[in-house]
Image (tube, helix red, strand yellow):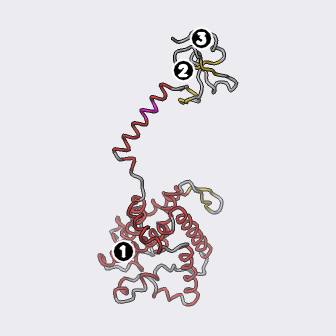
Amino acid sequence: MKFIQMLERKFGKYAIRNLMKYVIALYVVGLLVYSINPFAYIYLGLDIDLVLKGQVWRLVTFLIPYVTFGSNILFVFLKAYLFFVIGNALENAWGSFKLNLYFFSAVIFNIIAAFLVYLLFRINILGNVMIVISSPIDIIYSSMFFAFAALYPNTQFLIYFIIPVKVKYLAWISGAYYLINIYKFISSGYYFGVIPIVVSLANFLIFYIATRNYRWISPREFERRAKFRRQMNEGRKQGNVTGFGGRSVITRHKCAVCGRTELDDDNLEFRFCSKCNGNYEYCMDHLFTHEHVK
């Protein structure tokens, strides 16, 4: 976390604010490309063999999603809208720099995955793996979705605009989907399919681990908590503690004779006895009838 804060102090001024507006613009570009020439996508995809031959623009243009005007256009618009909402929520929680760092690290991990598959298996990830799993922009979206679920686990989405489901459960389902894909690739001997899943989602795991608070496992934190528990137990022994609603409750007033508190009756009144040796409090029924403590 300190490393990320150091990066933010040094490079925070270069962060792109409202990044999701530009990401959503990629969907518009995708629609324009399809409407002008659907075959133009072959010049935009992440073809590592062609990248190594000089077509370096593919390292950027592969982010343009393949969007058609077919029956799935409503789903595409809905996905783009959720992408925008999730991205803005992350920017509000993290700030512009951390969102930029998270998004572009996901882009870099996608590129790394493509290079690893090509160099290790001589397979072009564009035509063999991503069609089975999902497009690069979809994997980046999934990575951001997991981050959103970690920050806002109890946020509800309406499935089919009717069924409310907490986002943490959707994240678990998505994680299970990726694990099933990993198992299928391994069991089928297609080990190259595991790399893009693991590497592309690595930024979520790294970012999640890097931003956790690990003070709770430090020896000093254990000592502080133990000291707090000791002090709390001493306070319970010395203070007004009574059972209420099945649990121990520290009360403001407690009669030293009958043990009644303000929780037993709102109309009860309590007074300290000036003749007792110590701070002894009594209800009005026992204030004048108790034996004084010497």
Mark 3 or mark 1: which comes first in sequence? 1
**Residue corresponding to mark 2:** 279
Of 11 and 51, nearer the camera is 11
Disc 3 versus disc 1: nearer the observer: 3
* Residue annotated with mark 3: 290
Secondary structure character of the magenta stretch overall = helix
* Kind of residue sitting beneath label 3: His
* Measured Cα–Cα span from mark 3 to mark 2: 14 Å
- Residue 163 is drawn in which quadrant? bottom right
The x and y percentages for residue 23 are 53, 76
Q: Is residue 202 magenta?
A: no
Q: Quick check: marks 3 and 1 in contact, CB under 8 Å?
A: no
Q: Is residue 291 above or below residue 239?
A: above
Do the CB atoms of the residues marked 3 and 2 lie less than 8 Å apart? Answer: no
Q: Secondary structure at mark 2?
A: loop
Looking at the rendered image, the disc whose residue lies closer to the viewer, 3 or 2, is 2
* Sequence-first tag of 3 and 2: 2
Q: Label 1 belongs to which residue?
A: 112
Q: Residues within 10 Å of mark 3 (few under 14, many from 20)?
A: few
Residue sitting at the far front: 274
Disc 1 residue type (three-letter): Ile
- Residue numbers of the magenta segment: 229-233
